[in-house]
Amino acid sequence: MIDPKLLIQFNAEILEIERGNVIFEYGSKAQYYYQIKTGEVKMNNFNRDGKEFIQGIFYSDQSFGEPPLFADVNYPAGAETITDVEVFRLPKDVFFDLLNKHPEAHFNISEVLASRLYYKAIMASEISSQDPEHRIIRLLDYTKKHIQKMETHEILEVDLTRQQIADLTGLRVETVIRACKALEKKGDIEIKKRKIFR
């Protein structure tokens, strides 16, 4: 993402936010660029029944919530801390000034947004599929390749809970548990001490 030194040069403030707190709410106006210094953040929605759907989980050095800045629309999801976090926050006008003066940062943002669009397209087609095992494998493989930047032969230790996997794939947690057991029997994943490895 954007080099932290560059963010500091443009006077980004660093917010310290405790676990379980809201950074911005669904429907609120996008006014800042956010990039995680340390910790984890999720973007989520809730359906009419109150079931959470996680749009994405973001980690150190990743940004979140940028598309509404470019489109000048309100946030289509809320952002909430999963752990205690430190977050760089830059006002929208300063963020655009930074991008204009540093094209390499603009390119990095474009690359990240393209990768997220790709992920959304994959997950949209997977959610329409009725096969929970396939949905879970696609999520794990995407996490391995595009988030953790690992090679195919490397083993990913999945840091998502069963609930988070359910919320990311639109499944019930009971379905995730059953599907993971079936995937383990097939040899597609390993489960050791309740941790999933792919």
Image (cartoon, helix red, strand yellow):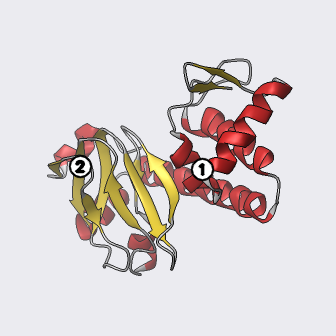
Question: Which residue is found at the position 24% from the left and 41% from the top?
Answer: 84
Q: Nearer the viewer, residue 135 or 50?
A: 50
Towards the viewer: 104 or 138: 138
Q: Nearer the viewer, residue 149 or 186?
A: 186
Looking at the image, the residue that sits furthest to the right is 186
Residue under numbered circle 2: 88
Which quarter of the figure has residue 184? top right
Q: Is residue 16 left or right of residue 106?
A: left
Q: Position of residue 132 (x, y in %)?
A: 76, 50
- Residue 123, percent from left and from top: 69, 57
Q: Which mark is residue 173?
A: 1
x 31%, y 78%: residue: 28
What residue sits 19% from the left and 47% below the top? 18
Q: Quadrant of residue 83?
A: top left
Q: Quadrant of the C terminus?
A: top right
The residue type indicated by label 1 comes to: Val
Q: Mark 2, residues whose alpha carbon is within 10 Å: few (<14), some, or many (≥20)? A: many
